[in-house]
Every structure is written in C-alpha cells, then in structure tokens.
Image (cartoon, rainbow, N blue to C red):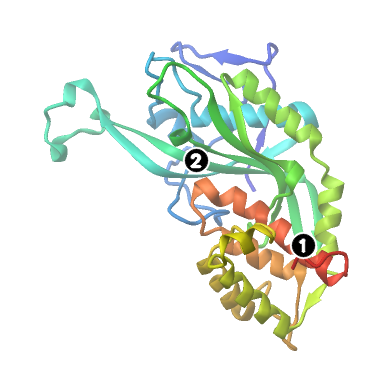
Amino acid sequence: MELVKVHQSQDNNTTLLSDGNRQSSAIMEVPSNREAREPNPFIEANTTHVTLEHLRNDCIVPVFKDNEVAISHTEFVETAINAVSAIFGDIKIAQPQLRISHMVKGRTPDALKIPTKELLDHQKTIYYERLAWVSKIPSHTKTINGNEISLCVGGVKSYSTDNLHSKHSVQRFKMFIGYINKICTNLCISTDGYKDEIKVMSTDELGQKVEQLVSNYDADYHLNAMERLSQFTLSEKQFGQLIGKAKLYNYLPKIEKQELPNLMLTDNQFSTIAKDYYNDVNFCRNEDGSIDLWRLYNLCTGAAKSSYIDTFLNRNLNAFQFVNGLADTVNGDSNSY
C-alpha cells in the first residue's frame, strides 16, 4: 500500500511555489506515471481513475464570473487531509483514490481556429466537473465478521452545484469519515460521519468544517452498529420478500411512501443485490438460504457503487440506515420494515 505522510506548514495555510502558483500545504507522494494501474474502485459508474499529479499539472481550474478562482479538486483533497491530520496528529494516510467524471474541454487562445484533429497537446485544456475520492488511515483497522475494515476519509465535489456564472460565491462539498471494507472497497458511512453539503468560500473555511466533522464522528458507535448486524439473520423467504417489497417501493402512491422510511437504492441496484445473494464470493447466502445483515449490508453498499458521483455517498449512507432499520425490526424494536 502506498502511504502519504501529511505535514502541516508552520502557518497552517499554503506554500508558495517558485513559479508563483499556490498549492495546499499537504506534502503528498504521487505516482510519476499518470497511467498508474487503477486500484479496486470504490465507485464504478461513469467514472475514471486519475492521480493527483494529473489533476495538479494537466487541468485548469474554473473561475467565477469576476475571475475569482474556484477551489480546485487538488486543494479540496489536500485541505481535507490536512484537517484530518490536525485532529489525529502524526498519522499516515494512504494515497487517495481519485475518480472523476464529466470532462470539460477547452483550448488555448492561439488555437481558436485550428481544426480539432490538428490541435497539439499544449493547445488543449481540460478539467473535470466531478470528483470523488477516498483515503485510508491504515493505523485504524478493525475486524467485523471476518472482514478487515479500515478507517477512511473522503469526499465529493461537483462544480455543477456552484454558480460559476456569478461573482465569487459559496462552493459546495460533500465530506465523510467512516470505514472501508478492504476485501471489496465497499464504503461504510454513518449519519454523524457524513455532511451532505458543506458550504465554504475558502480553503480555510473548508478545513475548519472538515475538522468539525471529524471531531464529531463517533467511531465506537459506528463500529458497534456494524458489529451488531452480524447477529441478525434473514431466511431465504424473508430475503425474497424484502427484495420484492423494495422493488415495489418506487411505485407506491405518494401518501403511502411518506409513511415509510426513505429508500434511495434503485430498482436496478436491488436486482444486483438479488444476483449477488447467489453469486457474490464474499457475501452470498448460507447453504440454507439465510443471510446475516452484515452480508446484506455489504451487498447493498456494493450495489451502491453503480451510483453516479452526485448520489453515491447519499445512497451509501441510506444503505446503512436501511439495514439498521431491518435489524431493529428483526430484534422487535421497530415495525418500520
């Protein structure tokens, strides 16, 4: 595993490079090869693996209408990692896995009238509208039901949520701290470890909001909730009823749906869960057809990988809430499910 050591600058702000550009104070070891082998992805739908080096060196940064620069993807990642380091102290954080989508292409002014096929590389500009990333903290690991999980941090940025056609204004980010299952890179996110919308005007504000999120995260509660799932089991008949009811959910009358817990996984994703119930190497059914809720949870988070960047984290969190609701029902504490 590649590790990156995070260092804080003395002024806890930014470092001025010799060419006049400003870069986050996180000192990160990045692969020199931009075509680095893609790791097992934590999200799959409509995304491509890239490196921080590529984002930093090959991509332009969008600006607002008044030409004020937006917070770049690299600043987002490095600012967040610095903030996590400020809370945890001297720790090592793994090289972030980065997934991008929605490339925005452009060209330099001297190439305005050149035919597309004749453009040279230095005359092309790109940036990516959307980014999702995850970094593991290998020193914080636990084992649940035979699976090793590692503490991780990550986030999502989409410039589509910002009003870049106006003067400099707030930018929106999604950020989480939780766990990642090492055998399948499924994310495990709880309510207090996730912020669906962080609004900031600067990297300083962003760092403060990330520190606040990390400080408020209750890792013990999250771990206990996940360990509890392996104590409850659904029979084959109950699992079949669950899948059938879940597929009916989106077709319910609005009034009936409002009386039920929110369910964000799609019909296609529940079809994936049904298929993996039989075929998944790590989380398939037992010989008698039963399945414990830890395995079901991982089938849900595995299916959520097919979500686009915009909805990926929300559906992952919803999977946690959904399966914990099932546990409460099986335990007799609720009849919601």
Q: Secondary structure at mark 1?
A: helix
Q: Quadrant of the C terminus?
A: bottom right
- The residue lying at 69 percent from left, 38 percent from top is 93
Residue 330, picture quadrant? bottom right
Q: Secondary structure at mark 2?
A: strand
- The residue lying at 78 percent from left, 29 percent from top is 87
Q: Amino acid at mark 1?
A: Gly
Q: Position of residue 307 (x, y in %)?
A: 51, 56
Q: Position of residue 160 (x, y in %)?
A: 44, 36
Q: Residue furthest front?
A: 255
> Local crowd at mark 1 within 10 Å, few (<14), some, or many (≥20)?
some
Residue assigned mark 1: 325
- The residue lying at 57 percent from left, 77 percent from top is 275
Q: Name which of mark 1 and mark 2 comes first in the sequence.
A: 2
Residue assigned mark 2: 131
User: For the residues marked 1 and 2, what is the alpha-carbon distance in whole angstroms?
Assistant: 31 Å
Residue 122, picture quadrant? top left
Q: Is residue 29 above or below residue 229?
A: above
Q: Is residue 100 above or below residue 147?
A: above
Q: Amino acid at mark 2?
A: Leu
Residue 3, picture quadrant? top right
Residue 207 visible in the picture: yes
Residue 184 visible in the picture: no
- The residue lying at 56 percent from left, 65 percent from top is 253
Q: Position of residue 133 (x, y in %)?
A: 57, 42
Q: Position of residue 96 (x, y in %)?
A: 59, 41
Q: Is residue 44 left or right of residue 177?
A: left
